[in-house]
Amino acid sequence: MGCDGGTIPKRHELVKGPKKVEKVDKNAELAAKWKYCALSQEKLKRPIVACELGRLYNKDAIIEYLLDKAAERPNSEAVTHIRGTKDIKELNLTDNPEWEGERRNTKGDRYEDIHCGMFICPVVGLEMNGKHRFCYLQTCGCVFSERALKEVKTEICHKVRKKFSSTFLILN
Ligand SMILES: [Zn+2]
């Protein structure tokens, strides 16, 4: 009656098509998260901080928010969990040598390679472009890929060469 398992690969292929398209959009969205402040939506620039939820912000934007929480600003609902500077951690990020910021195409228009990350993992070199999970150490704020933290069994931070407690938070 046609229900002989042979239908399974066909179904799989049908599911695969639309899923792939969704993934591309999601990658672009994820890549943007690593480049823009979750509060001000401006491009991230040091000093960059993270909250306990693992969102990235420009420290200036957070300080400005803390000084006047009542001021009208877009996205302030995104940071209501940040009550003071103790709720944020300044991150120690590693620049991606491949990152050139805005480039120009042959017509001279500025454009940005959305899949190129501004920062990388200093241990395994993965780019922070939304495709890999990254964590920061609560003690020193250094940022590593989850892969590096799993593969390199150490309690000494690769970057500041100091012991860290095993607590780290996942950036997202
Ligand atoms: Zn560190």
Image: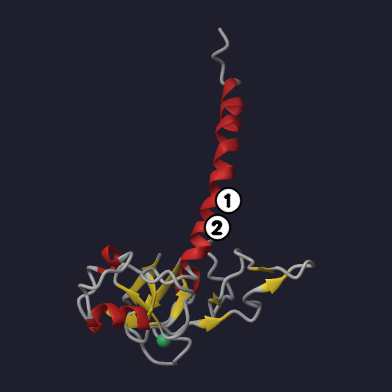
Question: Quick check: can you spot residue 20?
Answer: yes
Q: Residue furthest right?
A: 106
Residue at 61% from the left image edge and 32% from the top image edge: 13
Q: How is the image coloured?
A: secondary structure
Q: Residue furthest top?
A: 1
Q: Label 1: few (<14), some or many (≥20) within 10 Å?
A: few
Residue type at numbered disc 1: Val
Residue at 44% from the left image edge and 78% from the top image edge: 143
Residue 89 in the image: state x and y as whole percent.
Answer: 32, 81
* Residue 85, placed above or below residue 25: below
* Residue 54, placed above or below residue 94: above
Residue 86 in the image: state x and y as whole percent.
Answer: 23, 83
Q: Residue furthest bottom?
A: 161
Q: Quadrant of the N terminus?
A: top right
* Tag 2 and tag 1, C-beta contact below 8 Å: yes
Ligand 1 visible in quadrant: bottom left
* Residue 7, placed above or below residue 49: above
Is 90 displayed left or right of 34 in the figure? Answer: left
Is 86 displayed left or right of 47 in the figure? Answer: left
Q: Quadrant of residue 160?
A: bottom left
Tell me the element at label 1.
helix
Find disc 2 in the rendering and name its residue: 28
Residue at 26% from the left image edge and 63% from the top image edge: 77
Residue type at numbered disc 2: Ala
Find disc 1 in the rendering and name its residue: 24
Residue at 47% from the left image edge and 76% from the top image edge: 44
Q: Quadrant of the C terminus?
A: bottom left
Question: Quick check: can you spot residue 132?
Answer: no
> Along the line of sight, which residue is nearer the eye, 38 or 12?
38
Residue 145 in the image: state x and y as whole percent.
Answer: 49, 72
